Image: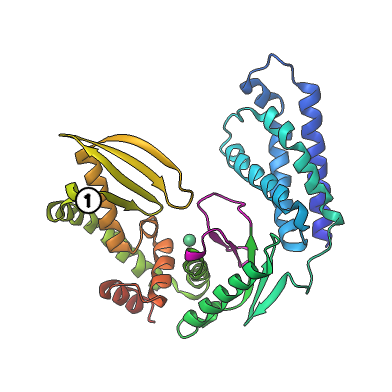
Amino acid sequence: MRKFAKNAAEFQAALYALNTAITTKLKPEMTDWWIAYHIRNEYSDFFRAALPYMRTILEEKQIPQQDAKAIEIAMREINQKARGANASRTPKGLVSWFNKNLPKFQLLLAADQWPARNTTSDLIKVGNFSVHNTVGLSAEEFKFVSSIVEQASQLLSSKFASVLYGDVYVVGQLQDRNAAAWYEYKSDKVYIRLYDRSRALHDLLHELSHRYYRKFTDAHAQRAWQTYHMRLHARMPAMAVQLLRETDLKNETHLEFGDDVYIVKSQAESLLTLTKMKKSTGKTKEMIVDKSSFFTIVARYRATTALFTSQYASTNPEEHFCDSVADFVLNKLNQEQQEALTTIFNL
Ligand SMILES: [Zn+2]
């Protein structure tokens, strides 16, 4: 609880300082660049204080149901802007952003009045896991998450039992829109958002695999895995060329890339008219693209997913490992992938 009091005091001071700086140091005619220059210290201090404070709220407090939405929005706004602040970009429209969200930031200050999370209904034990509800999920949703944790435990129990312990936090849409779940190495905690139920089990398996990779694999196996990962990268271009030769993309009308679906509306000699749709949100966008470059991208995507199990897995050896373990326990790896994983890590 002392951590909470300290973080709360720092956030309150930083919020007050930034608000004061905005009202006293700025003049109406200032450009974004000058605004950023004049309040740069208060601006960066605000995020330096806000991020740990938000984390502490999620860990230690029971967020009241009626404020959950506003708190989630406040945290998401801060997270999004914080990424801009870290990249030291000019914070465009900072003042109007701050003024618009100030009431929500002030709501965050009320957190010291909220009850501490304890052994009430917002925490349940699933095996050796403690599952925390930080977003005011309904009883039904919370039950769903517990069932996912239970399934993951069963799937991992024979070969990865060492990761089955600790805290799992179910949180709102706090970070990146893309991050459905994440593993925080420093605190050894797992966070998961309930935004796509069909992916929840895979995501949890993936995050627990980060724990396995970081804590329970040795440097020798990791090096062998890195070599395997690089070897697949080397094979990808030739495989894409072969796919392009063998498949008749011209006759396909729906082309999928993870969350995106491209629907071919019409074809001309060298151009394609497409509707791009996000599966998760249903948002659509029209576009016209060069046919041969688009088909090349399709072929590369398919080669990558065939070799690595997913596009995301190709980003680096650790993500590759995590997606592979998830697919391994779900019985989705092909024989070559399974052999590589079990041989290298002695599973
Ligand atoms: Zn990951």
Is residue 168 visible in the rendered structure shown here? no
Q: Residue at x 32, y 75 (%)?
A: 338
Magenta segment = 172-198
Q: Residue at x 72, y 16 (%)?
A: 28
What is the residue that sits farthest to the left in this orientation? 245
Q: Residue at x 45, y 83 (%)?
A: 159
Is residue 302 visible in the rendered structure shown here? yes
**Residue type beneath disc 1:** Glu
Provide residue 37's location: percent of width, then percent of height: 66, 25
Q: How is the image coloured?
A: rainbow
Q: If the image is split into quadrants, where does the C terminus sit?
A: bottom left
Most foreground residue, 337 or 195: 195
Provide residue 300's location: percent of width, then percent of height: 25, 51
Residue to which mark 1 is pinned: 252
User: In the rendered structure, does residue 121 fall within the stretch colored magenta?
Assistant: no
What is the residue that sits farthest to the bottom in this orientation? 158
